[in-house]
Amino acid sequence: MSGFLLGVLGGMGPLATVDLLQKIIEETPARRDQEHAPVVAWSVPQIADRQRALAGTGPSPLPDLLPALAQLNRAGASHILIPCNTAHFWYPQLAEASAAPIVHIADATVASLTQGAVARVGLIATQGTLDAGLFQQRFADMGIATLEPLPQEMTDWFVPGCYAVKRGELRRGGELLSLLAQALIARGAERLVLACTEVPPALAAIDSPLQQLSIDPTRALAQAAVRLWVAYRDGAGAVSL
């Protein structure tokens, strides 16, 4: 195999993994199969719940994440992607344990923004992602203010909406999460950052017009991966499998 191989540490949840893979395909400029990136995905949904771990009501997922990461490294991954925003709370430990660099989803999101294009964003994310500040400081460094959901909005809309998606009830999840999105827009958000990988498929399931105001970190991660692939492909030739 060539020296380039995207590794996806997935399963958090399975739909989010497939969503990233789909977006990598969509973002890749290709005229034939051979011009797409080689990818190996580790999608094992039995990884401990990230939200409950950070809330102190469940075990840490790190003991599950590290063996999965090792599998991707053994498979020869040259770059690793994690389609779960909350899992990036453990990014320092994962990056230290990985021979292959891990593309940080928040860095990819910031890289997709144009300086000065937006002054205030609404951040839709798990409480763990919000508390960890994975996005807020990066936005502040760009001069972008962040609006976060209110506690009651998290309880009434985000948490049940997120877990509805995990149950396969995408329309129900979309209905609940769109209420949160609308509340953030009403409070002054110019754009929405969908920093939970369950949110983009949920809003898509109800064809929400708020998608037009949204920044999708999963797509930004896909775009970052495709930039790496195209630079390799066009510089070193197509992958030979």
Image: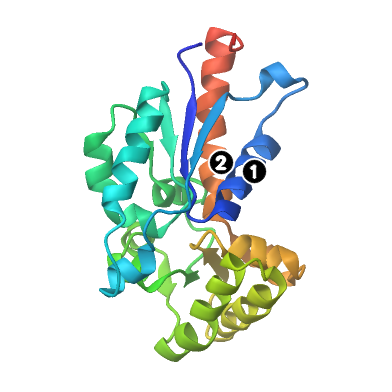
Going 25% across and 73% down the picture, which residue do you hit? 56
In the rendered view, would you say 194 is above or below 88?
below
Question: Seen in the image, is 157 located left or right of residue 23?
Answer: left
Per the rendering, the mark at residue 222 is: 2
Going 63% across and 74% down the picture, which residue do you hit? 173
Question: Seen in the image, is 7 located left or right of residue 157?
Answer: left
Q: How many marks?
A: 2
Within 10 Å of disc 1 (Cα), the crowding (few <14, some 14-19, many 20+) is some
In the rendered view, would you say 52 is above or below 60?
below
Per the rendering, the mark at residue 40 is: none
Disc 1 versus disc 2: distance between alpha carbons?
6 Å
In the rendered view, would you say 186 is above or below 60?
below
Residue 86 makes an appearance in the image: yes
Q: In x, y percent, where is residue 63?
A: 26, 49
Per the rendering, the mark at residue 23 is: 1
Q: Amino acid at mark 2?
A: Ala
Q: In x, y percent, where is residue 95?
A: 27, 39
Quadrant in which residue 163 is drawn: bottom right
